[in-house]
Image (cartoon, rainbow, N blue to C red):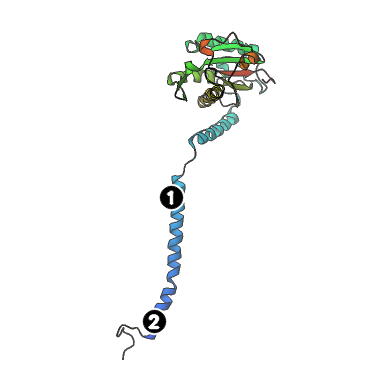
Protein backbone atom coordinates (compact mmCIF):
# COMPACT_ATOMS: atom_id res chain seq x y z
CA UNK A 1 0.00 0.00 0.00
CA UNK A 2 1.45 3.37 -1.06
CA UNK A 3 1.08 5.88 1.77
CA UNK A 4 2.07 8.88 -0.42
CA UNK A 5 -1.40 9.16 -1.94
CA UNK A 6 -4.81 9.93 -0.52
CA UNK A 7 -6.71 6.73 -0.12
CA UNK A 8 -10.29 6.22 0.97
CA UNK A 9 -10.56 9.90 1.93
CA UNK A 10 -7.61 9.87 4.36
CA UNK A 11 -3.97 11.03 4.28
CA UNK A 12 -1.19 9.02 5.71
CA UNK A 13 0.48 10.21 8.89
CA UNK A 14 3.40 11.95 7.16
CA UNK A 15 1.17 14.13 4.97
CA UNK A 16 -1.12 14.97 7.89
CA UNK A 17 1.87 16.23 9.88
CA UNK A 18 3.12 18.41 6.99
CA UNK A 19 -0.34 19.98 6.52
CA UNK A 20 -0.62 20.72 10.24
CA UNK A 21 2.73 22.54 10.21
CA UNK A 22 1.60 24.54 7.15
CA UNK A 23 -1.65 25.58 8.84
CA UNK A 24 0.29 26.74 11.90
CA UNK A 25 1.95 29.41 9.74
CA UNK A 26 -1.32 30.76 8.33
CA UNK A 27 -1.99 32.95 11.38
CA UNK A 28 1.00 35.12 10.44
CA UNK A 29 -0.66 35.96 7.14
CA UNK A 30 -4.03 36.59 8.79
CA UNK A 31 -2.48 38.90 11.39
CA UNK A 32 -0.65 40.91 8.69
CA UNK A 33 -3.86 41.29 6.70
CA UNK A 34 -5.71 42.48 9.79
CA UNK A 35 -3.06 45.08 10.61
CA UNK A 36 -3.09 46.35 7.01
CA UNK A 37 -6.86 46.75 7.13
CA UNK A 38 -6.67 48.65 10.43
CA UNK A 39 -4.02 51.02 9.06
CA UNK A 40 -6.10 51.61 5.92
CA UNK A 41 -9.18 52.28 8.07
CA UNK A 42 -7.46 54.91 10.23
CA UNK A 43 -5.87 56.56 7.19
CA UNK A 44 -9.33 56.79 5.63
CA UNK A 45 -10.76 58.33 8.82
CA UNK A 46 -7.96 60.88 8.94
CA UNK A 47 -8.50 61.76 5.29
CA UNK A 48 -12.23 62.28 5.86
CA UNK A 49 -11.74 64.51 8.91
CA UNK A 50 -11.34 68.27 8.53
CA UNK A 51 -10.83 71.19 10.98
CA UNK A 52 -13.54 73.76 11.59
CA UNK A 53 -13.33 76.34 8.84
CA UNK A 54 -13.43 79.36 11.14
CA UNK A 55 -10.80 77.91 13.49
CA UNK A 56 -8.57 77.10 10.54
CA UNK A 57 -8.95 80.66 9.21
CA UNK A 58 -7.91 82.19 12.50
CA UNK A 59 -4.98 79.78 12.76
CA UNK A 60 -3.80 80.62 9.25
CA UNK A 61 -4.23 84.34 9.97
CA UNK A 62 -2.13 84.02 13.12
CA UNK A 63 0.65 82.28 11.20
CA UNK A 64 0.49 84.85 8.42
CA UNK A 65 0.51 87.69 10.97
CA UNK A 66 3.62 86.29 12.64
CA UNK A 67 5.41 86.04 9.29
CA UNK A 68 4.48 89.61 8.40
CA UNK A 69 5.59 90.93 11.78
CA UNK A 70 8.94 89.15 11.49
CA UNK A 71 9.46 90.50 7.99
CA UNK A 72 8.17 94.04 8.47
CA UNK A 73 6.86 95.01 11.93
CA UNK A 74 5.56 98.39 10.79
CA UNK A 75 4.21 97.67 7.33
CA UNK A 76 4.94 98.62 3.77
CA UNK A 77 2.35 101.35 3.38
CA UNK A 78 3.26 103.56 6.33
CA UNK A 79 4.27 106.49 4.15
CA UNK A 80 0.99 106.33 2.22
CA UNK A 81 -0.94 107.60 5.23
CA UNK A 82 1.81 109.76 6.67
CA UNK A 83 2.34 107.44 9.62
CA UNK A 84 6.02 107.47 10.51
CA UNK A 85 7.74 104.08 10.38
CA UNK A 86 9.41 104.75 13.76
CA UNK A 87 6.15 104.61 15.74
CA UNK A 88 6.54 102.39 18.77
CA UNK A 89 3.99 99.82 19.86
CA UNK A 90 2.85 102.18 22.62
CA UNK A 91 0.53 103.95 20.20
CA UNK A 92 0.15 107.04 18.08
CA UNK A 93 -0.91 110.47 19.28
CA UNK A 94 -4.69 110.77 19.02
CA UNK A 95 -4.70 114.38 17.74
CA UNK A 96 -2.37 113.29 14.97
CA UNK A 97 -4.49 110.24 14.17
CA UNK A 98 -7.63 112.35 14.17
CA UNK A 99 -6.08 114.73 11.64
CA UNK A 100 -4.88 111.90 9.39
CA UNK A 101 -8.15 109.96 9.54
CA UNK A 102 -10.26 113.08 9.03
CA UNK A 103 -8.27 113.91 5.92
CA UNK A 104 -8.65 110.41 4.50
CA UNK A 105 -12.36 110.24 5.28
CA UNK A 106 -13.07 113.60 3.66
CA UNK A 107 -11.07 112.73 0.54
CA UNK A 108 -12.76 109.42 -0.26
CA UNK A 109 -16.44 109.15 -1.15
CA UNK A 110 -16.55 105.62 0.20
CA UNK A 111 -16.44 107.06 3.75
CA UNK A 112 -19.45 109.36 3.28
CA UNK A 113 -21.56 107.58 5.94
CA UNK A 114 -18.69 106.99 8.37
CA UNK A 115 -18.61 109.11 11.52
CA UNK A 116 -15.30 110.00 13.16
CA UNK A 117 -15.72 111.37 16.68
CA UNK A 118 -13.30 112.23 19.46
CA UNK A 119 -14.47 110.47 22.60
CA UNK A 120 -13.16 110.03 26.12
CA UNK A 121 -9.66 108.53 25.83
CA UNK A 122 -9.97 107.74 22.15
CA UNK A 123 -11.39 108.09 18.66
CA UNK A 124 -14.61 106.42 17.52
CA UNK A 125 -15.15 105.37 13.92
CA UNK A 126 -18.90 104.77 13.88
CA UNK A 127 -20.71 102.68 11.26
CA UNK A 128 -24.47 102.32 11.02
CA UNK A 129 -25.47 98.67 11.35
CA UNK A 130 -28.21 99.09 8.76
CA UNK A 131 -25.63 100.64 6.43
CA UNK A 132 -23.11 97.78 6.45
CA UNK A 133 -25.11 94.69 7.45
CA UNK A 134 -27.94 92.67 5.97
CA UNK A 135 -30.11 91.89 9.00
CA UNK A 136 -32.88 89.37 8.44
CA UNK A 137 -34.46 86.62 10.54
CA UNK A 138 -31.72 86.75 13.16
CA UNK A 139 -28.94 86.48 10.57
CA UNK A 140 -26.40 89.29 10.23
CA UNK A 141 -24.09 89.44 7.23
CA UNK A 142 -21.78 92.11 5.85
CA UNK A 143 -23.19 93.56 2.65
CA UNK A 144 -20.97 92.56 -0.25
CA UNK A 145 -20.88 96.12 -1.55
CA UNK A 146 -19.52 97.28 1.82
CA UNK A 147 -16.50 94.99 1.83
CA UNK A 148 -14.45 97.63 0.02
CA UNK A 149 -15.30 100.08 2.83
CA UNK A 150 -14.11 97.60 5.45
CA UNK A 151 -10.93 97.09 3.44
CA UNK A 152 -10.24 100.84 3.35
CA UNK A 153 -10.78 101.13 7.11
CA UNK A 154 -8.52 98.14 7.74
CA UNK A 155 -5.86 99.59 5.46
CA UNK A 156 -6.10 102.98 7.15
CA UNK A 157 -5.50 101.36 10.56
CA UNK A 158 -2.71 99.13 9.32
CA UNK A 159 0.26 100.92 10.87
CA UNK A 160 -1.03 102.01 14.27
CA UNK A 161 -0.31 100.14 17.49
CA UNK A 162 -2.95 101.73 19.68
CA UNK A 163 -5.33 99.43 21.51
CA UNK A 164 -8.47 98.90 19.44
CA UNK A 165 -11.91 97.86 20.65
CA UNK A 166 -14.92 96.91 18.55
CA UNK A 167 -18.16 98.01 20.21
CA UNK A 168 -21.54 96.71 19.12
CA UNK A 169 -24.66 98.62 20.08
CA UNK A 170 -28.30 97.65 19.53
CA UNK A 171 -31.49 99.19 20.85
CA UNK A 172 -34.69 98.13 19.14
CA UNK A 173 -35.71 94.86 20.82
CA UNK A 174 -35.89 93.44 24.31
CA UNK A 175 -32.71 93.58 26.37
CA UNK A 176 -31.52 90.01 25.78
CA UNK A 177 -32.01 90.29 22.02
CA UNK A 178 -30.23 93.64 22.03
CA UNK A 179 -27.11 92.14 23.53
CA UNK A 180 -27.12 89.20 21.13
CA UNK A 181 -27.52 91.54 18.18
CA UNK A 182 -24.81 93.89 19.45
CA UNK A 183 -22.43 90.96 19.88
CA UNK A 184 -23.12 89.83 16.32
CA UNK A 185 -22.43 93.33 14.99
CA UNK A 186 -19.12 93.57 16.82
CA UNK A 187 -17.85 90.06 16.08
CA UNK A 188 -18.82 90.28 12.40
CA UNK A 189 -16.95 93.55 11.91
CA UNK A 190 -13.89 92.30 13.79
CA UNK A 191 -13.80 89.19 11.62
CA UNK A 192 -14.04 91.25 8.42
CA UNK A 193 -11.29 93.64 9.54
CA UNK A 194 -9.01 90.66 10.08
CA UNK A 195 -10.01 89.21 6.73
CA UNK A 196 -9.15 92.50 5.03
CA UNK A 197 -5.70 92.71 6.58
CA UNK A 198 -5.79 94.30 10.06
CA UNK A 199 -3.95 91.73 12.18
CA UNK A 200 -3.75 93.38 15.61
CA UNK A 201 -5.83 92.18 18.56
CA UNK A 202 -9.26 93.76 18.96
CA UNK A 203 -11.36 93.43 22.11
CA UNK A 204 -15.15 93.20 21.85
CA UNK A 205 -17.60 95.29 23.86
CA UNK A 206 -21.39 95.17 23.61
CA UNK A 207 -24.14 97.42 24.91
CA UNK A 208 -27.90 97.09 24.82
CA UNK A 209 -28.97 100.24 26.65
CA UNK A 210 -28.07 103.93 26.94
CA UNK A 211 -24.84 103.27 28.84
CA UNK A 212 -22.72 103.56 25.72
CA UNK A 213 -23.72 107.17 25.16
CA UNK A 214 -22.83 108.23 28.68
CA UNK A 215 -19.51 106.39 28.73
CA UNK A 216 -18.28 107.51 25.33
CA UNK A 217 -19.75 111.01 25.26
CA UNK A 218 -20.86 110.60 21.66
CA UNK A 219 -24.44 111.81 21.90
CA UNK A 220 -23.87 114.09 18.92
CA UNK A 221 -23.21 111.03 16.77
CA UNK A 222 -26.44 109.27 17.65
CA UNK A 223 -29.20 109.65 15.11
CA UNK A 224 -31.93 107.29 13.99
CA UNK A 225 -29.60 105.53 11.56
CA UNK A 226 -26.99 105.06 14.28
CA UNK A 227 -29.10 103.63 17.09
CA UNK A 228 -27.93 100.21 15.90
CA UNK A 229 -24.28 100.59 15.10
CA UNK A 230 -20.76 99.33 15.59
CA UNK A 231 -17.86 101.53 16.68
CA UNK A 232 -14.16 101.03 16.10
CA UNK A 233 -12.57 102.61 19.16
CA UNK A 234 -8.93 103.59 18.87
CA UNK A 235 -7.68 104.20 22.37
CA UNK A 236 -5.08 106.70 23.46
CA UNK A 237 -1.77 105.32 24.72
CA UNK A 238 -2.20 103.39 27.97
CA UNK A 239 -5.90 104.19 28.24
CA UNK A 240 -8.87 101.87 28.51
CA UNK A 241 -12.63 102.12 28.80
Residue closest to the far right = 238
- State which quadrant residue 9 falls in: bottom left
From the image, tell me which residue sits under label 1: 44
Task: Tell me: 35 left or right of 115.
Answer: left
Neighbour tally class for label 1: few under 14, some 14-19, many 20 plus, Cα within 10 Å: few
Residue at x-position 60% and y-position 18% = 233
Give how far across and how far down residue 88 sits, in percent: 66, 22
Kindly state the secondary structure of the residue where label 1 is placed.
helix
Give how far across and how far down residue 104 sits, in percent: 54, 11
| Tally of numbered discs | 2
* Sequence-earlier tag: 2 or 1: 2
- State which quadrant residue 239 falls in: top right
- In this rendering, is residue 61 above or below 6? above
The quarter of the image holding the N terminus is bottom left
The quarter of the image holding the C terminus is top right
Give how far across and how far down residue 57 sits, in percent: 51, 33
Is the Cβ of the residue at disc 2 closer than 8 Å to that at disc 1? no
Neighbour tally class for label 2: few under 14, some 14-19, many 20 plus, Cα within 10 Å: few
Kindly state the secondary structure of the residue where label 2 is placed.
helix
Who is closer to the viewer here, 56 or 179? 179
Q: Which mark is residue 16?
A: 2
Who is closer to the viewer here, 192 or 160? 192
Task: Tell me: 51 left or right of 162.
Answer: left
- In this rendering, is residue 48 above or below 74? below
Q: Which mark is residue 230?
A: none
Residue closest to the far bottom = 1
Give how far across and how far down residue 108 sits, in percent: 49, 11
Residue closest to the far left = 8
Task: Tell me: 79 left or right of 45.
Answer: right
- In this rendering, is residue 111 above or below 182? above
- Distance (Cα) linking label 2 and label 1: 43 Å
Amino acid sequence: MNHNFKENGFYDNALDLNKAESYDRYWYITFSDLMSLMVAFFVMLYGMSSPKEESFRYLSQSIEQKKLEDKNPIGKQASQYGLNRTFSKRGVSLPYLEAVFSSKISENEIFKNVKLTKVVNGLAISLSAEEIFNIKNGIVEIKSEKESLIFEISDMMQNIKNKVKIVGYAKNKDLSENYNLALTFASSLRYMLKEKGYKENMDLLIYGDDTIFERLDVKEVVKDAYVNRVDILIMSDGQDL
